[in-house]
Image (tube, grey):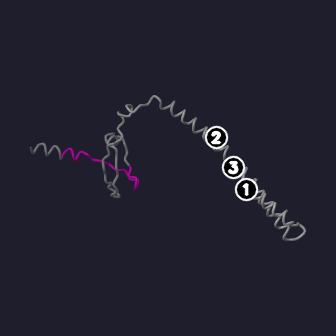
Amino acid sequence: MKYLYERVSYLRGLTDGLQISEDTKEGKLLVQIVDVLEDFADAMNELAEVHDELDEYVECIDEDLADVEDEVFADFEDDDYEDYDDEEDFIEVECPHCEHTVFVEEDVIEDDDADILCPNCHEPIYLDFDDEDDDEDLEDDDQ
């Protein structure tokens, strides 16, 4: 921001060197322009100081957050995630009302009390696996 002050000082020096007087309309205008530019330079300097303070504050918060993360996640190791199964088993079901394809977790299907609603038409989807079981029984009997 030092360069702004230097440039405004140069303009102020020009107005003084050219002996621009505030007695004329043009002189008043030029002197006021230089004054406004000086005010802008002051405002920019203040903003730069606030920016530097905020930058330091954010760096402190970042360091504190890194310390908290180290403390919280220090006990976790990659071995802890081996038991985690990130692939859920889903079954694709077609809604009988709107024919929208719905993916349902196997755990939900195995739970007899679970209600499955179509996200498209909001109608209940009733799954009947008895027919499939009967078909499997017939196939077993044929063999």
Is 58 left, or right, of 69 in this rendering? right
The amino acid pointed to by label 3 is: Ala
Tell which residue pokes out farthest to the bottom in this image.
Answer: 25
Q: Residues within 10 Å of mark 2 (few under 14, many from 20)?
A: few
Is 56 left, or right, of 42 in this rendering? left
The residue identified by callout 3 is: 48
The residue identified by callout 2 is: 57
Q: Secondary structure at mark 1?
A: helix
15 shown above or below 115: below
Residue at position x 51%, y 32% in the image:
70
Q: Which mark is residue 20?
A: none
**Where residue 48 appears, x then y in whole percent?**
69, 49
- Asked whether disc 2 touches disc 3, contact meaning CB atoms under 8 Å apart, the reply is no
Is 11 left, or right, of 56 in this rendering? right
24 shown above or below 118: below
Q: CA distance from mark 1 to mark 2?
A: 26 Å
The amino acid pointed to by label 1 is: Leu
The residue identified by callout 1 is: 4
Q: Residues within 10 Å of mark 1 (few under 14, many from 20)?
A: some
Could you say which quadrant of the image residue 110 lies in?
top left
Q: Secondary structure at mark 3?
A: helix
Tell which tag, 1 or 3, sits nearer the viewer.
1
Q: Quadrant of the C terminus?
A: top left
Q: Earlier in the sequence, mark 1 or mark 2?
A: 1
69 shown above or below 51: above
- Asked whether disc 1 touches disc 3, contact meaning CB atoms under 8 Å apart, the reply is no
Tell which residue pokes out farthest to the left in this image.
Answer: 143
**Where residue 61 appears, x then y in whole percent?**
60, 38
Q: Secondary structure at mark 2?
A: helix
Q: Which one is nearer the viewer's eye here, 112 or 70?
A: 70
Residue 129 colored in magenta in the image: yes
